[in-house]
């Protein structure tokens, strides 16, 4: 039995949640994947997966093996890179995902530079204001705003962004600037459709929640910013999202002294790919 091939198959089944998904990822037939896992279980003398008609789950022994198997495969990959000297030119399609505004402002220029320098490379850039599962969807790299939640992925900290409450200068002149978060009750609120920007906004070093009553709720950041610039009220966005409007004078910020802690930005990738 090729133990490295067996561990690669084991990790693929564990990360993709099933034998069929792992076979598609590896380019092997489902029976071949099943035989490899069975041989590995016989070799170790323990079951690695609990199988049912609907799902495949790791046993306690399988969960213990998973982290070690990932580490072994990563070390093998590192050793191969050292021996090969990373001399192979980049090629193939790179699958990338990022939030819409951040991707347009910061990721797209990097991708454009990469494509200009490496003709054999193509890219698919998915700009979405929601998280998708990297391993299951075959994504190579993701830019995420917030703390990483998937322990299967490696992460690289890129920096931080902060919350800003914005309105148009005309709105601030007509309605005044809120002195503190409690004063939001006296203002028109433009809400988003997620937890951070919905009916509870967070302020201060402890990120304490403040209930707000939205007068307008929209489902995209661009619409929130456009509504704020049109004078329809106060919007809760992130600093990179509002940067263009603030620099152009279409927006002004309020409650800066009450902002919650900064939000981290991470680059995430599946080290086994």
Image (cartoon, grey):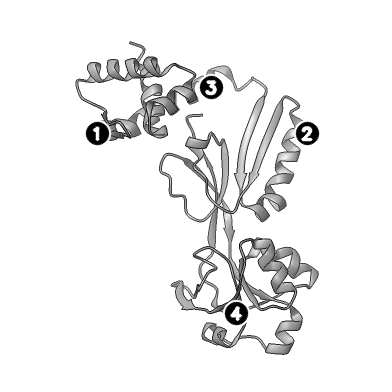
Q: Earlier in the sequence, mark 4 or mark 3?
A: 3
Is residue 59 placed above or below 187 in the rendered structure? above
Q: Which residue is mark 2?
A: 116
Whole-percent x and y of residue 272?
47, 29
The residue drawn where x is 79% and y is 73% is: 249
CA gap, disc 2 to disc 3?
A: 26 Å
CA gap, disc 2 to disc 1?
A: 47 Å
Q: Are marks 1 and 4 in contact (CB under 8 Å)?
A: no
Q: Earlier in the sequence, mark 1 or mark 3?
A: 1
Q: Which residue is mark 4?
A: 255
Q: Are marks 1 and 3 in contact (CB under 8 Å)?
A: no
Whole-percent x and y of residue 60?
23, 35
State which mark lies toward you, 1 or 4: 1
Furthest toward the left, the residue is: 45
Local secondary structure at mark 3: helix
Image side of residue 14 versus residue 164, left or right: left
């Amino acid at each position: 039995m090729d133990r490295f091939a067996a561990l690669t198959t084991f990790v693929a089944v564990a990360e993709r949640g099933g034998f069929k998904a792992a076979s598609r990822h590896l380019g092997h037939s489902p029976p071949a994947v099943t035989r490899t896992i069975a041989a590995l279980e016989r070799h170790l003398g323990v079951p690695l997966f609990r199988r049912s008609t609907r799902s495949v789950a790791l046993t306690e022994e399988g969960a213990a093996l998973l982290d070690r198997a990932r580490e072994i495969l990563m070390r093998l990959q590192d050793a191969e890179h050292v021996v090969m000297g990373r001399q192979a030119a980049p090629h193939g399609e790179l699958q990338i995902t990022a939030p819409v505004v951040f991707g347009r402002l910061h990721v797209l220029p990097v991708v454009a530079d990469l494509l200009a320098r490496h003709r054999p490379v193509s890219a698919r850039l998915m700009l979405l204001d929601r998280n998708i599962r990297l391993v299951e969807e075959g994504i190579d790299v993701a830019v995420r705003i917030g703390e990483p939640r998937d322990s299967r992925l490696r992460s690289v900290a890129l920096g931080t962004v902060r919350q800003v409450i914005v309105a148009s200068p005309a709105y601030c002149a007509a309605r005044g600037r809120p002195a503190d978060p409690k004063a939001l009750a006296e203002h028109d609120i433009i809400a988003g459709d997620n937890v951070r920007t919905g009916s509870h906004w967070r302020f201060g070093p402890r990120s304490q929640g403040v209930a707000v009553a939205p007068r307008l709720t929209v489902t995209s950041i661009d619409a929130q910013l456009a509504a704020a610039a049109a004078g329809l009220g106060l919007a809760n966005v992130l600093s990179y999202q509002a940067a263009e409007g603030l620099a152009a004078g279409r927006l002004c910020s309020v409650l800066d002294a009450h902002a919650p802690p900064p939000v981290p930005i991470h680059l995430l990738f599946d080290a086994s790919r």
